[in-house]
Amino acid sequence: MGECQQDMHSIASEINEQEGILNTTTYEIYKAIDRNLNVFESDAAGTTITYLGIEFDNLLYLIEKFVGEIEKGKKAFSSDLNKHGCMKHLELAKYFLMMNAFSALYCPSKIYSPHVDLFFVMFRMRYGDVLGDLSKNPDAYSGLFNKKEGEYFNQFIEEIYEMTLQRIFKRKLYARMEAFRRGHSSSKGYLDALFERYARLLVLRIDFGFRTENPQLPHTVGLLDAQEHLSRFLNNKRGKKLYTNLTGYIWRLEYGKEKGYHFHLFFLFDGSKAHKDEYLANEIGADWIRVTSGKGIYHNCNAHKQRYKRLGIGMISHDEEEKRRNLLEVLAYMHKEDQTLREKYTDKTHGWGRGAMPSARALGVGRPRRIGPLN
């Protein structure tokens, strides 16, 4: 039996060594979510402070991969025995030892992707008592019916596979795709309208959060309070000289266990009148701190433009197609992340928002653009 267990450990360890474990898009979305929820950055007195939360590098993307492979009909263990008298390992055997780690990621306040949600539902409803206490040996006997643990795992996989064939699961996948399409279309239409109206835009990205003295303790700023702070900030900008040339904004709400509720915001200024994006972003960050009575913190992304391989912030002219696409790509990620992992909102809260579309009259002003809406 020792040979069986040693082989299992070696297979499981391969998972985290494979950089291309998911198709690039899905993998990068989960890594972006991980960074957004578990990497802390704040600016104060000209210094940026960065540290990692204890949940950094979580395993949600492996659950997505696991269920995706089940959906393709892959298996974990064969009833045929190998030369050591153990069940033969198939493609999904590498996930056997990860059930405890996977189950520990569940959070009742989150809405997951259809694949990850299906895993949690099946695990918690049907198999938690057995798979949540594995002996690390698929050939060990466990449970009231004296089955091998590997057989329980096979049964778990088979039931998930059957669920992926159901119409209700397919509808969830379609609903997720449609929600992304609507959100992305709204943001794209908004940006296209602004670039049609203005020859160039000064684009600022600023992250707003809330101060905590001890990241190990729960944040005192709840969901409703966080949204009220943002609403107060957006309403109070009216009449302030700082925002005279502001033409629009887009925001997204997120939550991390240690980071608490926080917002990613894009501010879009008339580039013919507004300049010095780093300075302007710091002033807006300072305004956020004032509006929140000192509870707020911020991070000025424009002060670190060298980090971005595909730059979509700073000054962008309407005919700089590459920069416009880069900005649109970042916003697409935001919407994809929202359909992959997000908080459960109430009737009074929302996950993202934007400013009002330019008026029809305003859209007719100015010279025709050489580059119109992006495809």
Image (cartoon, helix red, strand yellow):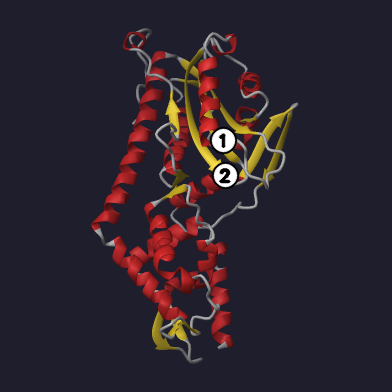
Instruction: Return the x and y of residue 21 as percentages of the image width and height.
Output: 48, 60
Depth check, front residue: 283 or 260: 260
Identify the element where label 2 is drawn: strand
Toward which corner of the image does residue 48 lie, by quadrant?
A: top right
Query: Residue drawn 37% across and 53% down?
Result: 114
Left or right of residue 49: residue 87 = left
Residue ID at (38%, 24%): 190
Relative to residue 47, is residue 329 drawn left or right? left
Do the residues under discs 1 and 2 have CB atoms within 8 angstroms? yes
Res 7 quadrant in image: bottom right
Q: Amino acid at mark 1?
A: His
Q: Which residue bears the numbered disc 2? A: 256
Task: Classify mark 1: residues with Cα within 10 Å, few (<14), some (14-19) or many (20+).
Answer: many
Query: Where's the N terminus, which quadrant?
Result: bottom right
Residue 345 vs 201, above or below: the answer is below
Residue 374 at least partly seen: no
Provide residue 46's location: percent of width, then percent of height: 74, 27
- Which one is in front, 75 or 25? 75
Residue 303 vs residue 146, the one in the foreground = 146
Q: Quadrant of residue 144?
A: bottom left
Q: Residue at x 35, y 21 (%)?
A: 372
Left-right relation of 182 to 232: left
- Identify residue type, mark 2: Gly
Q: Secondary structure at mark 1?
A: strand
Mark 1 or mark 2, which has the lower sequence index? 2
Q: Which residue is mark 1?
A: 262
